Image: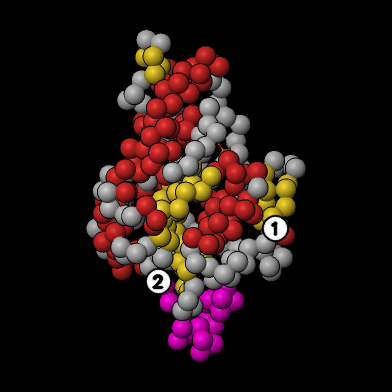
Amino acid sequence: LRGLRAAGSSSSRSRNATQQRLPGAVIIGVRKGGTRALLEMLNLHPDVEVAKAEVHYFNVEEHFRRGLAWYRAQMPFTLPGQLTVEKTPGYFASPHVPVRVWEMNPAVRLLLIVRDPAERLVSDYTQVLHNRVTRHKPYQPLEELLLRQGHIDPAYKALQRSLYHQHLARWLDVFPREQVHVVDGEALIRHPFPELRRAERFLDLPPRIAPSNFYFNTTKGFYCLLSAGGHDKCLDESKGRPHAPLSSQAFRKLCGYFREPNRLFFEMVGRSFSWC
Ligand SMILES: Nc1ncnc2c1ncn2[C@@H]1O[C@H](COP(=O)(O)OS(=O)(=O)O)[C@@H](OP(=O)(O)O)[C@H]1O
């Protein structure tokens, strides 16, 4: 397909059959959960084509106002039977998004990749910090944002994004539980293949992704991807950055804070994770 899609292709198959189609599956979050890795890994499947850039259609008003024709125009070209997938981690915690996604296609499949919410928060802060430092903007240390008079400040945005049960509850008000597949982000880092096999099953795809599509890159410290065409791909340096420092005392407080929200999330998804 990639060849067929090349500009100026005269193949009748290309002209007649490839089209931009709305996604049949969306990776809705969580931010810093491993959404890029999951998207790139699904793209190894011959029946999957992905939107390379985050689209932010349902969560950014300016985009949403442009309508579904605009959204479709952001999608890759696919042959009939191929599955289009997009990922925008900002969808998960945006209040209006679940209904908007349902209105696009009530049968769409949703993928949610989660990781330890305390680690996710630190990763989230680290990304914001990196952006501010790069733009020569002032920044506050994580502990200043996270703690108020020694207690966790519930108003901190990155903390709220880690309250998975609250956000998922809004999705489950709209979509049946079976339509949401939860991917374990830590497991995807350690052993990507089994997580991908489960995702293929959820998406009703024939099993085509193989262990040989992954190799551990010792320099990067992560698995990288090998596609059938022999392309070798690691995620860029924005993934797997060293995390900003946080005292072990503050981290413990954070873990304590998430205990109950995590329990509620586990109940909601019917499985538990070994988070702090
Ligand atoms: N194979 C592989 N290679 C590199 N990185 C990997 C991989 N699998 C998962 N991850 C983890 O993905 C984390 C970034 O998550 P996202 O892609 O969801 O981030 S973002 O929200 O789109 O910015 C990123 O989090 P940090 O380590 O905190 O940077 C990675 O740990």
Using the numbered discs, state the Cα–Cα distance from disc 1 to disc 2 in whole angstroms.
Answer: 29 Å
Colouring scheme applied when the structure was drawn: secondary structure
Q: Nearer the viewer, residue 53 or 174?
A: 174
Label 2: how many Cα within 10 Å (few below 14, some 14–19, many 20+): many
- Report the front residue among 117 and 4: 117
Q: Which amino acid, by three-letter code, is at mark 1?
A: Pro
From the viewer's perspective, is 241 left or right of 162? right
Can residue 161 be seen in the rendering of this structure?
no
Q: Residues within 10 Å of mark 1 (few under 14, many from 20)?
A: some
Q: Earlier in the sequence, mark 1 or mark 2?
A: 2
Residue on which the image places disc 1:
211
Amino acid at circle 2: Arg
Query: Which quadrant contains ligand 1?
Result: top right
Residue 173 sits above or below residue 20 on the image: above
Q: Residue 77: x, y in percent?
A: 47, 73
Q: What stretch of residues is rendered in magenta?
A: 1-21
Q: Is 68 left or right of 266, judged from the image as shown? A: left
Q: Residue at x 47, y 69 (%)?
A: 83
207 horizontally vs 35: left or right: right
The question of residue 10 being in magenta is answered with yes
Task: Note whether 269 is above or below 262 in the view shown.
Answer: below
Q: Residue at x 61, y 31 (%)?
A: 242
Secondary structure beneath disc 1? Answer: helix
Q: In the rendering, which numbered label is found on residue 21?
A: 2
